[in-house]
Amino acid sequence: MKRVFLGTGLIGGGLAQAAAQRGDEVVVWNRTRSKAEALTEFGAEVAADAPTAVAGVRHVHLALTSDAAVDAVLESIMDALEEDAVVIDHSTTSPGGTLARAEKMAAAGKRYLHVPVFMSPEACKAAKGIMLVAGPEPLYQEQLSAIEPMTGRVRWCGEKKDAAATLKLVGNCMLLAMVGGLADAFAIASSNGLGSEDVMGLFADWNPGYMLQGRGARMAEGDFETLWTLTMARKDLGLMKDTAGDDAGLAVLPGLGARMDGMIAEGEGERDVAVLARDSLNAGKTGK
């Protein structure tokens, strides 16, 4: 199989390297040529420009840094794409931008799937992790055999053109919340003479991720049966901030506390802390 990778940074470079090592014929292009040239040791061919790269290639992979970058590259290659080529876009982009691109490609008679990834650079090289896919289902089914070797799991998100883009942001939201929460946890522990190893030891014995299957599932259904009142949770958050101290540089707790204060002022204090999801769930029901 011949593939072209446009954008060979950490993600695109890892995917291209893995494809070459699997035996695919790989062509690469990157705005900074040295990043593409680094892949020649794995057998990749470096193209002079993006239009040259896609000539004669059916599988065109994008791994770019922004909506603007994706739009610019697509504009440059539109006339050079083969009639039966499919653009497989792994870029993390806005839902609105993704939808507009997908519709523009369809109107031009070009085939396009949005396939963002939850894969580290090392996971890209090892074909582990997960790829999300959104776009026309017949095209997804046709291209599944080309996508599956690139990752550990493929999740079909449906024909809604911006669904994978939205879910990619949902996933990154959780990653950032966990990183920020962990940074705050380290600050609380450090302020009282404990180290990061103590924090990680706690989480080795008690996995807070189980919350997603329990409280998370109830939240998703709008079930706010009281197990831990918002008022008590806010009290505990105050203890966390006081313990960490004013100079801790907390990432998550200050903003969360402000949100809790507003909801308590609205009379929600005796409901479960899961009521924090109230407005987002209501917006989803009304289609906002």
Image: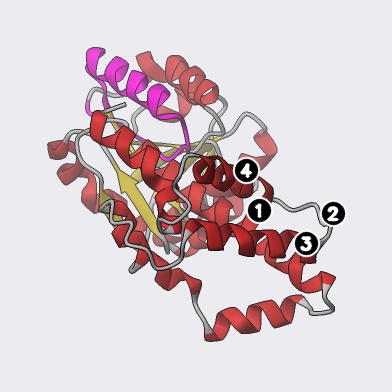
Of tags 1 and 3, which is closer to the observer? 3
* Cα–Cα gap, marks 4 and 3: 15 Å
Left or right: where 244 falls relative to 145: right
The residue carrying mark 4 is: 258
* Cα–Cα gap, marks 4 and 2: 16 Å
Q: Mark 2: which amino acid?
A: Asp
Left or right: where 113 falls relative to 178: left
Q: Are marks 2 and 3 in contact (CB under 8 Å)?
A: no
The residue carrying mark 1 is: 253
> Residue 192 is drawn in which quadrant?
bottom right
Q: Position of residue 110 (x, y in %)?
A: 26, 21
**50 or 273, which is in the foreground?**
273
Based on the picture, tell me whether residue 89 belongs to the magenta stretch.
yes
The residue carrying mark 3 is: 242
The residue carrying mark 2 is: 246
Q: Secondary structure at mark 4?
A: helix
> Residue 143 is drawn in which quadrant?
top left
Magenta-colored span: 84-111
Q: Which residue is found at the position 81% from the left and 72% from the top? A: 190
**188 or 81, which is in the foreground?**
188
* Cα–Cα gap, marks 1 and 3: 11 Å
Q: Are marks 4 and 1 in contact (CB under 8 Å)?
A: no
Q: Secondary structure at mark 2?
A: loop
Q: Mark 3: which amino acid?
A: Asp
